[in-house]
Image (cartoon, rainbow, N blue to C red):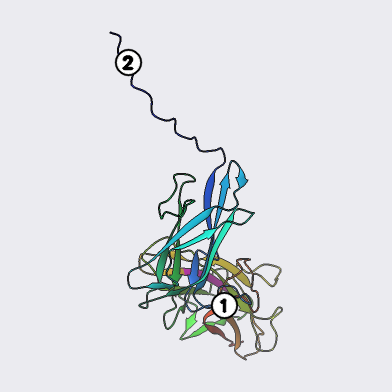
Amino acid sequence: PTPTPTPAGPTPTPTPTGTSLTLGATHTTFLFNADPDGSGDLGNNQFRISATVIIGGSPAANKWVRFTLTPSTGDTVAPAGPFTVQTTSSGVATIGPITFNDGGAAGGTVFVYACVDQDLDGTCDGSPTPATTTLYFLRQPATPLSSVITTGCASGTLIIDECVPGGSAGTPPTGQPAGKDVTLTLTLNGPASAGPKLPVIAVITDAFPPSGTTANASFTTCTTPASDGTDVQARLTSYDGTNHVATWDIFVCGIVNDTNYDTFSVAVYWDVDGNGAYTAGVDFQIGSTLTFTIEDNN
């Protein structure tokens, strides 16, 4: 007799074209004990997470999304979840505010897992594919900012005027005054990971042209003819194997050459709105403002 073929199983339902679940957050890297949204409703160490569900190329409303949050060892989040939230007409489900609590002093992480659970049985549906992201929290040490005056340009804690264009009749050290005068370093504690990238900005307060006892300085090489240079410079922190750091080169571009010592100052901020510029009332200052003094021997 002719063998009867084994009936084929049900044909899997294909994933519709343009089907996805994506995650977004207030930030992916935070500064611990700092306001993450300026005048917004979030407080220190708080965040929101949103999931956007697209099915067949269009936002999917009324889909139940399940969020699970897993903080790093010794840390907690409140409320802890898990959370199940229905998408709006724009296909978005949002949780928060949620507060991260650091159990130590080294910062931490929150691992976020989200999936569609349309029948609310606690098991993720096969489509869309679940999504994940990690939030990072960095912390300031007692002294997060440090500076080093370039070799040959230091007189104790002062910058010598030979290293300033037109600052002295003396002979500049080799490479000066064209080279940098100071290296400024921001150091933050955090997870042993290259993942965290905190946007930070450094801001110089100076005078152009130099006036009274206020010098002119720049984060970029001094220009000829003289101009105000670069007084704001953005960076992303990076992991150096021990800490999360950012550095800036500082050039002193002019002083009032009258034997009175001249100064300028530098402050560093978490660039909360990520616009690469200082926004008062939004960006959060890290550490204390540093003042640099130039020795003026005329």
Residue farthest bottom in this picture: 260
On the image, the x and y values in percent for residue 280 come to: 65, 78
Q: Of residues 160 and 25, which is closer to you in this image? A: 25
Q: Position of residue 15 (x, y in %)?
A: 50, 38
> What is the quadrant of the C terminus in the image?
bottom right
Residue 160 at least partly seen = yes
The reply, left or right, for residue 238 in relation to residue 2 is: right
- Furthest residue in direction front, as rendered: 1
Q: Is residue 124 above or below residue 76?
A: above
The residue depicted at 48 percent of the width and 81 percent of the height is 154
Observer-side mark, 2 or 1, equals 2
Farthest residue to the top: give it. Answer: 1
Q: Nearer the viewer, residue 20 or 72?
A: 20
Total labels: the figure holds 2
Residue beneath disc 2: 4
Q: Which residues fall within the magenta stretch?
A: 246-251
Kindly identify the amino acid type of the residue bearing the numbered disc 2.
Thr
CA gap between label 2 and label 1 equals 74 Å
Q: Is residue 4 magenta?
A: no
Which mark identifies residue 168? Answer: none
Q: Is residue 91 above or below residue 37?
A: above
Q: Amino acid at mark 1?
A: Phe
- Image quarter hosting the N terminus: top left
Q: Determine the secondary structure under disc 2.
A: loop
Q: Residue 244 lies in what quarter of the image? A: bottom left
Label 2: few (<14), some or many (≥20) within 10 Å?
Answer: few
Look at mark 1 in the image and give the residue it sits on. 284
